Image (cartoon, rainbow, N blue to C red):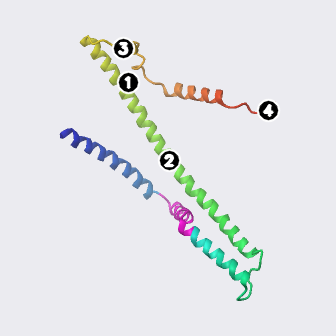
Amino acid sequence: MKATASLETLTQQNVDAVAKLETTSEIKRPRSERASDAIAFGIGSWTFLITQTIILSIWMVLNLVGWVRHWDPYPFILLNLALSFQAAFAGPVIMMSQNRQARLVDRRNQLDLQINLLAEQENTEMLRLLRLLCQKSGIGLTELAKTEILTQETKADALIGQIETTAKEREPPVGPAK
């Protein structure tokens, strides 16, 4: 029972740490980022899409049917101008919001990488200690455990080099097909 309570406590501490990270990130945002996020959220909603569709449909119907004077006859040049104006401002605002979110994701990835590297170091040390305990206790080791491969420290820069080399080898050749 006590192990469950301590596991719950540990889990809650992790949840609290992530929540604190999120809260700190939200508090430090300048008004411009808050505004771009709010606009991007609004533009990216079904409410906006449906509302815009209704407005555009009404605009076209009123200008085609002609109950009142046509203010934008077919091919709806004024409507096209308004939509172009909207797109000219919406695009950069959405990009600003996405850039901020990308920075936050990069930060989370850096944190995740650091935690993974720390966990790898801890696991390596635990495997080394476990191997020593087995040897001291006279417990037989598998061939893999006898080689000490698993107790070696992983070198991140060498691993990155292996990944890049493999990626380059798998890239298709660039140039005209023969």
Residue 4 image position (x, y, % from top left): 22, 41
Specify whether 27 is left or right of 70: left
In the rendered structure, are the residues bearing label 1 and label 3 in contact, judged by CB atoms less than 8 Å apart? no
In the rendered image, which residue does mark 1 sit on?
A: 124
In the rendered image, which residue does mark 2 sit on?
A: 105
In the rendered structure, are the residues bearing label 2 and label 4 in contact, judged by CB atoms less than 8 Å apart? no
The kind of residue on which mark 1 rests is: Thr
| Marks 3 and 4, how far apart at CA | 51 Å
Q: Which mark is residue 177?
A: 4
In the rendered structure, are the residues bearing label 1 and label 4 in contact, judged by CB atoms less than 8 Å apart? no
Residue 173 image position (x, y, % from top left): 73, 30
Where disc 1 sits, the SS reads helix
Nearer to me, 153 or 32: 153
Circle 3 packing at 10 Å, graded few (<14), some (14-19), many (20+), is: few
Where disc 4 sits, the SS reads loop
Specify whether 74 is left or right of 50: right
| Marks 1 and 2, how far apart at CA | 28 Å
At a point 45% along the width and 24% down the height, the residue shown is 154
Q: Quadrant of residue 151?
A: top left
Q: Of the residues under marks 1 and 3, which one precedes in the sequence? A: 1
| Marks 2 and 4, how far apart at CA | 38 Å
